[in-house]
Image: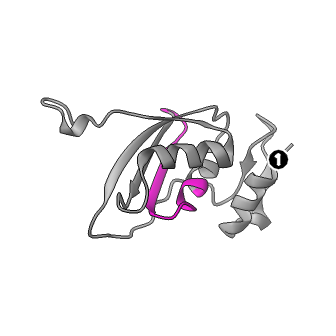
Amino acid sequence: MVSSMKLALLFAAGLGGAAAICPICGGGIQTAAAQPAQVALQAPDTATVRLHISKMTCGSCPTTARLALKRLAGVYSATVTLDDSLGVVRYDPRRVKPAEIAAHLTRLTGFGATILPDTSKTPGGGQ
């Protein structure tokens, strides 16, 4: 059964007309527009947090997670991938904290969200 929150997220994004129940997990939503996307907003003070997102089971789960993340005030962009269960969120650290972002995602979707260490600030780390 599709949760009312997932449907609300899809309708809020303007995707409601193309939604269908996922035949694989029975709980996700497939849409014609379910593809990776980012909001290209620039802000003077931004930070990035990486999240390990658990309990995603189908190809439309990342879209559900991304839409939920983007609904949080202070979040500029969110990219979520199923293959590595990774969410990358660009946000305004004056308005929202990483723990609030993770809690928001879990509250709206039921997915687990764990903040990953920032490897870009450790010696020898980074990408």
92 sits left or right of 101 in the view: left
Q: Which residue is mark 1?
A: 2
Residue drawn 53% across the image and 60% down it: 70
Quadrant into which the C terminus falls: top left
From which residue to which does the magenta span run? 67-84
Quadrant into which the N terminus falls: top right
Q: How is the image coloured?
A: one colour
Q: Quadrant of the rendered structure where residue 16 is?
A: bottom right
Quick one: SS at disc 1? Answer: loop
Residue drawn 81% across the image and 48% down it: 3
- The amino acid pointed to by label 1 is Val
Instruction: Note whether 112 is above or below 12 in the view shown.
Output: above
Give x and y (percent) for residue 69: 54, 54
Instruction: Note whether 54 is above or below 89 in the view shown.
Output: above
All told, the count of numbered labels is: 1
Q: Residues within 10 Å of mark 1 (few under 14, many from 20)?
A: few
